[in-house]
Amino acid sequence: MSMQSDRAVRLSCMITTVLWMTLCTSAVRADVRVVQVSARMAALGTDLQSGDVLATRSGPSLTAQRFRQLEWTDAQSAPVALQRQRAGQWQSVSLPAGEWAVDVVDVDAVADAATFDLANAAQRESQLRERWQQTFQLSTPSAAWGIALLRELARQGKATEIQTLLPDVFAVASAAERVATLYAVHSALTPQALREWTQKAQASSATVANDPALGNLTMLAYALLRDLPATESTAKALFSNHADNLWGMRAALALALNAFRQHDHAQAEAWLAKAEALAARIAPTGLDSANAQVLRGVIDERLGRPGGMAALEGGLQRFRVLDPNSAAHGRAAFNAHFIALSQTPRDLILAERYAREALTVMARVAPASNAHAQARTALADVLWRQLQLTEAEQLFTRPSNCSLRRGATRMPWTRSATKRSALACNWPRSGRHRDVWKTRWRRAAKLKRQWLDCLTTISCERAHCGKTCCDSVQDGSWMRAMALRRRQISTRRCS
């Protein structure tokens, strides 16, 4: 009896051990592999690296599409807990609330994905392109590698390559992946192109048409196009369906900006307060809080309240850490430059610093955009105010890809003309609006000629410059001629 009892005990122990090992190995499954991680993850305290494997401990398998759904749903209300495998060891990892900007692929999508090295930034684009071309040749291609490649191209501001690649990735992507595709590149698209692509995504699937992420992109496109009625209707619809998460927070922020643009300060304050409350409750240290802080600084400064510039600088500092060299970062720095110029007295040193920051960011992420041309003009204007004429003239006369593409000529040098020329690259291609913009451009050129006619007839004998304005015009330095005109002591006026 004792031998049989011992044998039964050993058999029972073996069965228990096998079952325990089976449960342990099946509790965590290797589902998706991380191929690209944004800088904000480390800044928010999430230890995630390229090559890590992510999985869920329970529930459905974590595919690339399921990972994106978690980002659009659960992560908009609270952090998401997952399992991470690194060097053969499984550990728990918490992904923060908000947008992750993390690219993953299925573990079995490419046989040797485990040996794929994306840590080298110089080779990342070529490696991602190679993997996308490999998967694109398969009978059932996955869009995951294409999304990762598009995000890398957007980070480098390669708009032309994005326009070539985007249709292929969009064609093979699922409904959820199409939204993720547009999210990866929306900062590198023009507002009109973003609106067209969101319309294509809405028409592709009834499910996607109600996706809050796509609604947020549509709202952003309208806001950038300054279509105030469409922005308001889209934002209110998004807020009514998602008033208790970060989608509602972004809608409230858009409504606050919309109201402020229409000089409805009471409504702007009410919507901004709602956005700030949601961001503080769900993601107090994330990008959404940074966006709310920047808008708070702009509104407070424009309304003459104390602390506006400090709030704006605080939001900018968050962008420098969480999302450096992004379009949102560039826009925030550009707004800060205007705020510095609107102070009494003008803080030209601070305005120059912010204008340089905006130009540096836009030159990297959107080098052929209207925003880049505006940032360049803004810096030239600040330098001209400080009589740093050589660099100012170089910025004014430097041709941009946008001006060459639209056939624009050298920019006029008067202040009024500068404001018009800053938007010269955004001429409509046809219709009544194009005629209006052409008229403004001709008026700016006429102002330039009037200035030059005046400058060539006025002496600078009392300007303490040792040189006449006429000499400066003959030398071709229009900016210097204007500065000498400002410095001279004369009662003559330009007609």
Image: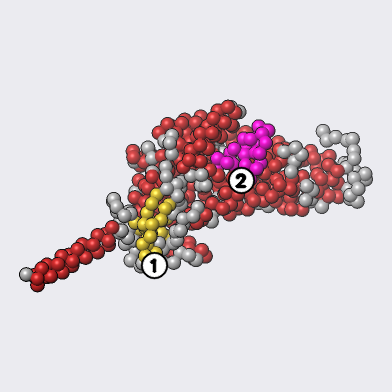
What residue sits 40% from the left and 62% below the top? Answer: 52
User: Which residue is at 58% across, 34% downward?
Assistant: 433
Q: Quadrant of the N terminus?
A: bottom left
Answer above or below: position of 193 versus 238: below
Q: Give the image location of residue 26, x and y in percent.
A: 26, 59
Is residue 270 visible to the viewer in this orientation of the structure?
A: yes
321 vs 41, left or right, is: right
**Figure quadrant of residue 385:** top right
Say if residue 258 shows up in the picture.
no
Dominant SS type (magenta): helix
Q: Seen in the image, is 4 located left or right of residue 341?
A: left
* Side of 440 where 291 appears, left or right: left
Tell me: 419 left or right of 290: right
- Of 366 and 196, which appears nearest the observer? 366
Which numbered disc covers residue 87? 1
Q: Which residue is mark 2?
A: 314
Q: What residue type is disc 1 on?
A: Ala
Residue shown at 50% from the left, 66% from the top: 120
Tell me whether the residue at label 1 lies in contact with that at label 2, contact meaning CB atoms closer than 8 angstroms.
Answer: no
Percent x, y of residue 338: 67, 41
Q: Is residue 312 magenta?
A: yes
Boundaries of the magenta span: 291-313
Question: Residue at the spot x=82%, y=33% of the render?
Answer: 495
Q: Nearer the viewer, residue 123 or 306?
A: 306
Q: Nearer the viewer, residue 469 or 335?
A: 335
Mark 2: which amino acid?
A: Gly
In the image as oriented, which residue stretches furthest toward the bottom? 3
Secondary structure, mark 1, is loop
Outermost residue, front direction? 2
How far is mark 1 from mark 2, CA to CA? 38 Å
Give the vertical position of 13 relative to 292 (above or below).
below
